[in-house]
């Protein structure tokens, strides 16, 4: 149990800016096993984002609450995944060979593709969350703060499951050890797979108790994951940490949009 706690805090330290016990470091052995808790980190980030939304919407309104919740999630993670998304936009937008793409993604400066991608991503996320929060969705007749809380948690956990699953099915692209994400890519066991599936799907299963049809969100989320992984494989023969971050961001937005589509068309 003590070892599992150490692995969990290693994941918490790596994926967020939340303070951890002093004895926790980036030990490659524990970091490699931390992927099992990646979706669980989504529970924490989603809960914090929802808490900020609930307080801010009570003080002001839903729109301000959503903006502040998005800011909170960025601060909690240190823009870890958003940075990966921007790097992927720049790398695949400006590079035409594996070497060029990887070089651009390694550059810490953000380019035009990355800036435009982030603006559009945040706009989509904001509009979809506002629609869900204001009840313009499947939850119009079943709406409650608890339901919205589950939406926040599920969006973060399911998207992280989609991202980390790429580690289980594809090879790491970089041949050197320059990426801080490489220890996660070295090896995994059934414990990492089962842990990621459990923490990634449990919030969705709870959400489905109010409306089973919500389970359909799995299809577009993992379809997006499939095509992203296929695209990465085609151009860079695998994935990098930036690719995982981009996958998480895209799948999170697709989750919110799918909930809205379910309400509108079914």
Image: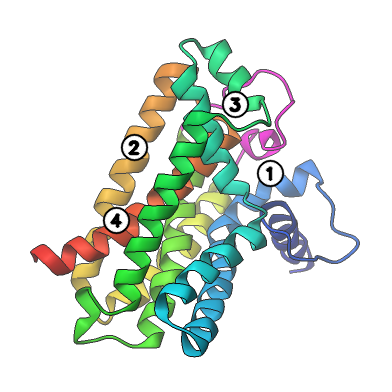
Horizontally, residue 245 falls left or right of residue 116, namely right
**How far, Cα to Cα, is label 4 from label 3?**
29 Å
Q: Where is residue 63 in the image (x, y as percent from the top left)?
A: 41, 73
- Labelled disc at residue 32: 1
Front label number (2 vs 1): 2
In space, the residues marked 1 and 3 are separated at their CA atoms by 22 Å
In this rendering, the answer to whether 266 lies above or below 218 is below
Secondary structure beneath label 4: helix
The one of 109 and 213 positioned closer to us in this rendering:
109
Secondary structure of the residue carrying numbered label 3? helix
**Which of marks 4 and 1 precedes in the sequence?**
1
Residue 150's image quarter? bottom left
The residue that label 4 is drawn on is 218
Looking at the rendering, the stretch of residues picked out in magenta corresponds to: 170-189
Residue 139's quadrant in the figure? bottom left
Q: Distance between the residues labelled 2 and 1?
A: 23 Å
């Amino acid at each position: 149990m003590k070892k599992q706690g150490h692995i969990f805090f290693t994941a918490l330290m790596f994926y967020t800016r939340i303070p951890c016990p002093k004895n926790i470091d980036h030990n490659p052995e524990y970091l490699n096993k931390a992927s099992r808790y990646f979706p669980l980190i989504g529970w924490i980030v989603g809960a914090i984002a929802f808490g900020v939304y609930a307080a801010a919407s009570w003080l002001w309104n839903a729109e301000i609450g959503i903006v502040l919740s998005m800011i909170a999630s960025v601060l909690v993670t240190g823009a870890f995944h958003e940075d990966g998304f921007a790097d992927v936009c720049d790398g695949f937008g400006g590079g035409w060979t594996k070497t060029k793409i990887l070089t651009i993604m390694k550059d810490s400066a953000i380019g035009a593709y990355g800036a435009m991608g982030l603006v559009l991503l945040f706009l989509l996320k904001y509009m979809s969350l506002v629609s869900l929060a204001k009840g313009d969705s499947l939850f119009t007749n079943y709406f409650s703060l608890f339901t919205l809380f589950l939406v926040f948690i599920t969006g973060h956990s399911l998207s992280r499951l989609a991202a980390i699953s790429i580690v289980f099915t594809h090879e790491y692209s970089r041949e050197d050890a320059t990426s801080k994400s490489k220890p996660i890519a070295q090896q995994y066991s059934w414990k990492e797979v089962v842990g990621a599936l459990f923490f990634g799907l449990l919030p969705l299963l709870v959400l489905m108790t109010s409306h089973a049809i919500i389970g359909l969100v799995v299809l577009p989320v993992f379809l997006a994951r499939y095509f992203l992984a296929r695209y990465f494989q085609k151009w860079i023969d695998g994935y990098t940490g930036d690719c995982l971050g981009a996958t998480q961001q895209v799948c999170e937005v697709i989750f919110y949009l799918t909930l809205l589509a379910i309400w509108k068309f079914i």
